[in-house]
Amino acid sequence: MPGRAGQAARERNAAAQRRRRERLRQAQREAEALRLAAERAAERGEARGEAAADRPAQDVADGAVDDSDGEQAEAEREAARERIRERQRQRRAAMADAEREAEHLLDRERQRQRRADLQEEEREAERQRDVERQRQRRADLQEEEREAERQRDVERQRQRRADLQEEEREAERQRDVERQRQRRADLQEEEREAERQRDVERQRQRRADLQEEERAARRAADAAAAARRRRAARERGNRSACDAEAVLSGRQQVAVQDTGQRNINCEHCGALRWPSERATLCCQAGKVRLEPVPAPPALLRRLWTEDDLLARTFREHSRRLNTALSLASMMTREVRPADGGYAPSVVIQGRLYHRLGPLEAGDGHEPSFAQIYVNDPACADPATEAAMRLGHVPLPRATSPAVRQRLLTLLEDLQLLLREVNPYVQDFILASELPEDQVDQQQLVISAEARPADQHRRRYNPAEGFREAAVLIGDEPVHQDIVLRRRAGADGPALQTINETHRAFEALHYVLLLPFGTDGWQPGLRHAVPNARGVYGQLTLTQYYAYRLQERPGMDDTLLRGARLLQEYVCMAFARVETQRLLWAARNQQAIRADLYQRLEDALPVDALAEQREGEQRLGRRIILPASFTGGPRFYQRR
């Protein structure tokens, strides 16, 4: 196909060149004809001029015979010669005009020919681009077909595994039924009949021996015993229901609960929902509208989606790898099994903090988190840096050398990737390279907003070369800002706590989920649709995460592929939401006191009330939680 297209193009070019040469020859012939016509016209004019000149000369000669005035005849001859010279000048001017007209025609033909040549070249270039686009479309279509075939293969393998597990469960049920039938068959019919007779006789004898009062007491005791047995049966059922091994092995049957297919698309944001989910869960019926999280680089996308050994290792240790590469550390208490076994879920207790240290490690301390990027800005020795990062992450005792080597390989590739795409990593490295005197004279901050709404425009000046950091001039930063420090101060804290309302609260820690440093929730976010009063309401933190944690066809789903890292992200989101709700309750005590103040004394200890009334002890500020706060005392009292 490319050979035939090239041959056709060459034939078209040859035909166009032949047409151009023919038009040029035609223009030359026309110009030559014009020149010849001009020459003939000039010759005819010269002949007529000579004849006219001869006639006056003859008249002058004849008059000389009759008239002896020679001077008058000479004047007339001179006038005749002047007229001849004038006609010659006119002929030369006419010939020059004809030549210029011919040259002008040739110039016009050459320009038209150049335009035709240029158009022909542009058409040929456009044809070449069309051929290239068609080839690219065919290649893209083949790649999509191969990807669809791979997806079908994965689905078929998953279905085969599910069918195999179902067959094993069915076989186990059949074996249980067979064992029960065998036990019943082992009992002899005579033994069962004799046992029934003995039971009847014992019951008759007991009824005969018991008096009326004793029978009443016995009935009460039997009722109490039956209640205890029912409670014990319920407890055994609860314990057996919690026996995950029995459920997974098939020894205990669990009733099937079908939630239906997740095939309902939200008409506003396109999120997939289960049939029983509220229609306003994802986007509040179109009020919430956020920019999608950018798709990760190709390396990260492959690690989150592929099924090779390196990608499986990445997903299994995603939390450890993210901790090793993060810029800010997460401080919280994680609840683990008492026996030290595997925990299928991430469970945290208490408040959660993200903290950021100085850019340079102190004397006698090894670099960690963001300090590792600064320690070797150009990453001249990736293996050493990866080993340093892995040394800060606790690995299970059973981790094999092969898995450890794969983790080191992943860390080498990912730390280079983050240096290229993460703006916070680039700003931290650039801040560490500033001269000492420049650092002492100004403060580099990552503001809670691009420019805080309550601050002057010139107060936060963009720093040269930085993408997220700004220079703070002439004032102290607000409490939400993150101040980049070269090293820890002698009288200040070693770690800086990142405020929960800061836009970089997530991006500084979850670098594998947000490699481009995408901004998170901040107080200034608003609804996309105004309410009935025409006011754009504030976007709450709960609504923000409800929108983010949804799957939407056609949009990147890397966040939902995070495995254990996604569990940690969801725990962080819940803790962040609960912290905001507690802060709201603390700051709005006057708004909720109307229906709770009359029960305030019931919430205080008796001795504390006495001490308060007597003035012996001054109590601190007590925060009353409303009944709408899940898990609070009034929440349970209302239930």
Image (tube, rainbow, N blue to C red):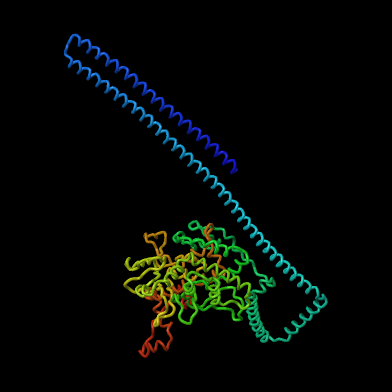
Image point 80% across, 77% down: which residue? 192
Q: In this view of the protein, which residue sits in the foreground, 162 or 103? A: 103
User: Residue 30: which quarter of the image?
Assistant: top left
User: Residue 81: which quarter of the image?
Assistant: top left
Q: In this view of the protein, which residue sits in the foreground, 615 or 80? A: 80
- Residue 213 at what x, y percent from top left? 66, 86
- Residue 339 at what x, y percent from top left? 61, 81
Q: In this view of the protein, which residue sits in the foreground, 477 or 272? A: 477
- Residue 149 at what x, y percent from top left? 63, 55
Left or right: residue 19 compared with residue 45: right
Left or right: residue 90 compared with residue 433: left
Q: State whether residue 556 appears in this view.
A: yes
Left or right: residue 582 compared with residue 2: left
Q: The N terminus is located in which quarter? A: top right
User: Residue 621: which quarter of the image?
Assistant: bottom left
205 is higher (above) or lower (below) than 68: below
Q: State whether residue 639 appears in this view.
A: no
Left or right: residue 572 compared with residue 601: right
- Residue 89 at what x, y percent from top left? 29, 25
Q: How many marks?
A: 0
> From this viewpoint, which residue is outermost toward the top?
66
